[in-house]
Image: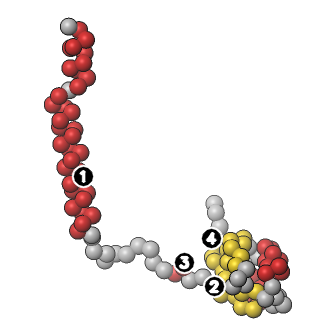
Amino acid sequence: MREKRLGVAVWVKNIHAAKNLRKFGTIHYVSKRLNYVSMYVDADEIDEAIRAMERLHFVTKVERSHRHEIPIYYNNAKPDKAKEYDYRSEKSQLLSIVEHVQEHDFDGARTKAAES
């Protein structure tokens, strides 16, 4: 099973020294212009990793990502009326196509024409 990982932004003085951060987690992105490293760290070891990274001489600041705290499912979301109308019209169109196919029975018509 995959371990839970949390995002961390590490602000550095020198980008070339940023590859030393690989031992703390998986580096996702390195910004040369803004001098920061976006990386993922195992959730179980995040506190120790942040303390260890802050002690490094080339690290300016370490920030945790709060993305995991944002809810992604909302209970009281109002349904979109436009989408609801589109789904109903699609359903009615599909039902009319099915009825049309069943009425005409194209396969049966072909076999009768082939027999004659």
Q: Nearer the viewer, mark 4 or mark 2?
A: 2
Residue mark closest to the camera, 1 vs 4: 1
Question: In the rendered structure, are the residues bearing label 1 and label 2 in contact, judged by CB atoms less than 8 Å apart?
Answer: no
Q: Residue 54, located in which quarter of the rendered image?
A: bottom right
The numbered mark, 4 or 2, whose residue comes first in the sequence reads: 4
Query: Mark 2 falls on what kind of element?
Result: strand
Q: Are marks 3 and 2 in contact (CB under 8 Å)?
A: no
Q: CA distance from mark 3 to mark 2?
A: 10 Å
Dot 4 falls on a residue whose secondary structure is: loop
Do labels 3 and 1 touch, CB within 8 Å?
no
Q: CA distance from mark 1 to mark 4?
A: 40 Å
Q: Which quadrant is the C terminus positioned in?
A: top left
Q: Which quadrant holds the N terminus?
A: bottom right
Query: Which-is-in-front pick, marks 4 and 3?
Result: 3
Q: Amino acid at mark 1?
A: Glu
Relative image position of residue 106 (x, y in whole percent): 23, 25
Q: Nearer the viewer, residue 5 or 56?
A: 56
Q: Residue at position x 22%, y 38% from top? A: 98
Three-letter amino acid code at disc 4?
Lys
Q: Earlier in the sequence, mark 1 or mark 2?
A: 2
Residue type at tag 3: His
Q: Which residue is mark 3?
A: 68
Query: What's the CA distance linking mark 3 and mark 1?
Result: 36 Å
Task: Give the number of callouts.
Answer: 4
**Residue annotated with mark 1:** 90
Give the structural element (helix, strand or loop) at label 1. helix
**What numbered label is drawn on residue 4?**
4
The answer to whether residue 43 of the structure is visible from this angle is no
